[in-house]
Image (cartoon, rainbow, N blue to C red):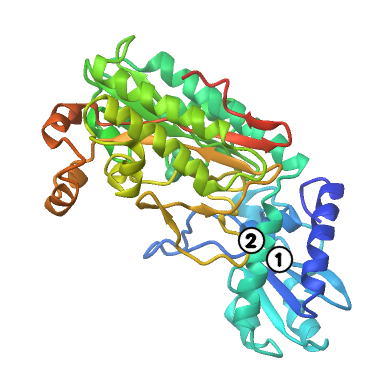
Amino acid sequence: MGNLDSATLVARLERTTPIFRATGATVIIGAGSPIPVPGGQDRVHPYAPHPAYYWLTGTRRSGGILVFHPDDEWIHFVCPVTNAERLWEGDVVAPTGIDVTDLVEWIQSRTHTRIALLGCELPSLIHASLPAPIDGELSAALADQLDATRRRKDDTEIALMRRAVAATHAGHAAAQEFIRPGVTERAIQIVVESAMCQQGADGTGYGTTVGAGTNAAVLHSKPGSRVVGDDDLVLIDAGGIIGGYTADVTRIYAAHEHLTKRQQSIYDIVLAAEEEGIRACKVGAEWHDVHRAAAHVLAQGLIGLGLLRGTADAALETEAIALFFPHGIGHMVGLGVRDAGGRALGREAGRRSCGVAVRCDFALEENFIMSVEPGLYFVPAILDDSERRHRHRDIVNWDAVTPWREVGGVRIEDNVLVTANGPDNLTAAIPK
Ligand code: GLY
Ligand code: MN
Ligand code: MN
């Protein structure tokens, strides 16, 4: 059907068929189309297919529509290659399938109990000609079920992840070699991305973060003209992408050979929290508990430095830890830097932990790949917020915090495959 091996694709369709069949519905899954650049005339943003469509078809071509019908089962409608594409883009290949312009006639000739739409919106002409309205509730429920099905990575996905990790490793190794006082964040970005692409990456899985000095306190700091100073640490969060699968790795590098004493103290705490988080990635573990385990180590460390008072449990309960660890422990990673995360079927939305939104709310299963990324940051917008300073006046030693601001922030991030034998850190070889 597409450009992945057919046994893999057949197995994915077989995993999905009973879920769709049980509803008796017709299920339409749109690949999506390139998004025009506003005011850009015929220019479009780089395109990526909807992950649900790509996972089931293996094709990254736009405009396709995969349909499950209880009688006909799976039918793939595709956009044939145009002469304009041959002229401007060269050797474009379309997957095997029925011309998408035949979809309207096909769908109108079949009977449907209900129609669900997953993936991207349909082109308006096709949408308008559907023989029944789209069932929004069913669509949302099936999208959740397909996400839940996709969470367990198959061998093809794990192999792609390992290749993405190898490319990412090359990028970080090149950065480590290159970083020294006087280079700019932008120059570091170019070195990282170039090395990843030379090692086989198709590109980057997300915007590369390079934060020198206090810029490391900006969670997704965009690399700019800031020059690395003598005592700066440099935070790099970068991942190479291959076949739609990306790694997502954060490391901290010293401008000179060693971190300063303060930087090292924060680094050691974050590393201990990360190791605790990785250890917790076992089959059956609740992701919220992984967050809590890492947050506990961070809180204990800040108490040790005299920045927090009382117990680690109190720092978690009062949510004071979120002043320094203001994000979740991580997310599912793989087919995109935010892969099929979300929550277990039937769980309420928006459950928080230790004062933050944690992106995933489910128990870990075999072959999930999770990014584990605790951090400690000294974010001026948080530390200078009078309401928060007042609320946490007893637990935070605010005077003691001030000299630590120069550290900026430390995050350490690895990608962990959950196995029956425990966590397998796919990115462990990238030095930290
Ligand atoms: N590297 C982007 C993120 O994890 O948020
Ligand atoms: Mn991440
Ligand atoms: Mn990251």
- Location of residue 399 with respect to 76 vertically, above or below: above
- Location of residue 421 with respect to 13 vertically, above or below: above
Label whose residue precedes the other's in the sequence (1 or 2) = 2
Residue 37, quarter of the rendered image: bottom left
> The N terminus lies in which quarter of the figure?
bottom right
| Residue 18 on image: x %, y % | 83, 67
Residue at the image point whose x is 21% and y is 41% from the top: 395
Q: Give how far apart the Cα atoms at labels 1 and 2 are.
A: 8 Å
Residue at the image point whose x is 64% and y is 72% from the top: 141
The one nearer the camera, 183 or 69, is 69
Observer able to see residue 236: yes
Residue 66, quarter of the rendered image: bottom right
| Residue 182 on image: x %, y % | 24, 18
Three-letter code, disc 2: Ser
The one nearer the camera, 208 or 334, is 334
Determine the secondary structure under disc 2.
Answer: loop
Q: How many marks?
A: 2
Q: Which residue is mark 1?
A: 79
Q: Which residue is mark 2?
A: 62
Q: Is residue 229 left or right of residue 168?
A: left
Observer able to see residue 63: no
Determine the secondary structure under disc 1.
Answer: loop
